[in-house]
Image (spheres, coloured by chain):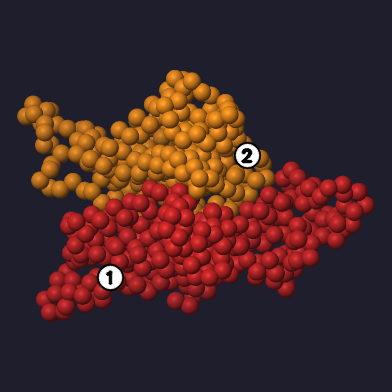
Amino acid sequence: MISPSPDKLPSAGLTPAQLERGVSPWRDAWHRLRRNHLAVFGGVVLIALSLLCIAGPWFSPYGYEQTNLDNTFSPPSSAHWLGTDQLGRDLLTRLLFGGRISLMVGLVATFVALTIGVIYGAIAGFFGGKLDRAMMRIVDILYALPFTIFVILLMVFFGRNIVLLFVAIGAVEWLTMARIVRSQIMAIKRMEFIEAARSLGLGTPRIIFRHMIPNILGPIIVYTTLTIPGVMLLEAFLSFLGLGVQPPMSSWGVLIKDGAERMEEYPWLLIFPGTIFSLTLFSLNFLGDGLRDALDVRAAKD
Amino acid sequence: MFRFIARRLLETIPVLFIIVTATFFMVRFVPGGPFDSEKATTPEIRANLEAYYGLNLPLHQQYTNYLKAIVLHGDLGRSTKYASRTVNEIIADKLPASLQLGGLSLLIALVLGLTAGVIAAVKRNTKTDYAASSFAMIGICVPTFVLGPLLVLVFAIHLGWFSASGWYDWQDRILPSLTLGIVYAAGIARLTRGGMLEVLNLDYIRTARAKGASEARIILKHALRGGLLPVVSYLGPAIAGILTGSFVIETIFQIPGLGREFVNSAFNRDYTLVLGTVILYAVLIIALNLVVDVVQVWLNPKLKFE
């Protein structure tokens, strides 16, 4: 755990004029985050990787599905920087293209999880009482279920449809978000500004979404960042079992699976996708941890 | 405590009922059936097969028959893929390998994780601490399906110390258990370090020191008990993860376990085998979670069996 030590107060590095104007909590967090080298490294790597994956394939002379049976399993060379696979496809192009898919799955499925989790948690926390108890009991029960098994069943039965992949993964990963949002909502619902909003006669949805959610954005952002690696891991897990993205499309999970099958003779097919994927997980985890420390989010344990 | 356990056991009945029902109808409403892949099945043979498995009965009757067989005889039915075998036999055949893999992985995770975590906490902010933390990073960032093949490449193919696949003697068990164990060892190491650091600053540790207890005794007897708490609550998800994680490990290392069987059974539309496995995994996970909860309260007197 990296936590800011007391001699490095967030105000350090500011000019007196800035100090006089005061520092917003967001700016404060930003300063703390910048001091966390691992988190900064993670953030930079993520931005660079995303840009590469988005723009890279445009500049590649090869298509991701373009085969060349005269040039299979070529080791890294000047023509194919990362070598080619069993069908002579350019690994770099497939890696970047697969990155688009993997990152997109990460973002979209996380968004699904975020939406369900925030709404569910907010309702349970806001209304409290019996409703809350029933809703949280459901979450407890769901936590204990072998969900991965259901995702596998869904993917096998309904075909390897990428939209279904998003929904299935999102539907599994919302539980922690719901718990966190609930506890945060409970913590602020007795505060005066909420009373004020209520006395203005505002409707419940408006109070929740306009007044409460913006005030608990910190924890939501932190756990979103920490959900993305979990989601990407699940996608790769499914792809590895042959249940994720279908060929000739690629994703990092698909490439790792293909690489693992042939690593004995052609280790680069495993090593490059494996490294990129691990690097991404590393970056997301450390950025998430850094954000958690910077935004000082604590109510995470339960 | 017995009331707590009894109540939790009662609660699992509706949960299991929902799981069985949901899975039962899910597998039946999906496109494709168990006999689609058989070549040239004449309508008569097909009808006979369906009659044999009771698939020609109305759906609600199939459902009640299935439930009755489970509740009355613990009978999970007959596999539609391997016609001569019952699901109970297949499970009895394949589960031991999966359980062994899971048990060894959990053991490795606990031993490596606790050791690394305690050492990192005691030697806080030294090189030893950083080394232990970097080790934990590997487990967090390198997924099993990358780590597994890499370990095979190094230790089985290049060094030839262990075998790359199979499940016959102890050499076959090391790489798979290590692969699965390291991931959770990393999580445990991080949590142990955090938990120990919090506890080591508390008054009762200072009291123990003041009484002249040896450092080893303070750490192992007094601090570890409190420091273990976050680890124990992590064990629930970890166990579920190890059980499902073994699907991938069994695929990589070609282990004849239940995980691989489950994935195949889903592809084969082997309704009864899919259902049987899902029920079994659900029971296992729920039971182990209960154990974890009991241990948690036992370790922390502040929590009560509510």
- Relative to B203, is A282 on the left or the right? right
Q: Quadrant of the C terminus of chain B?
A: bottom left
Q: Is residue A234 visible?
A: no
Q: Residue at x 48, y 20 (%)?
A: A61
| B42 relative position to A250: left or right | right
Horizontal side of residue A159 vs B286, given as left or right: right
Q: Which chain is red?
A: B
Q: Choose between A65 and A174: the one closer to the eye.
A: A65
**Viewer-proximal residue, B134 or A21?**
B134
Residue A193: x percent and y percent? 30, 37
Label 2 residue SS: loop
Please state which amino acid type lies under the numbered disc 2.
Answer: Arg
Which tint was used for chain A?
Answer: orange
Q: Which residue is mark 2?
A: A160
For the point 54% across and 68% down, the residue is B99
Query: Which residue was labeled with disc 1?
Result: B224
| Residue drawn at 72 percent across, 55 percent down | B271
Q: Secondary structure at mark 1?
A: helix
Q: Chain of mark 1?
A: B
Q: CA distance from mark 2 to mark 1?
A: 47 Å
In the rendered structure, the residue with mark 2 lies on which chain? A
The residue mark sitting in front, 2 or 1, is 2
Residue at the location (87% across, 47% down)?
Answer: B40
Quarter-wise, where is residue B114 in the image?
bottom left
Residue A15: horizontal and vertical position, in percent?
8, 29
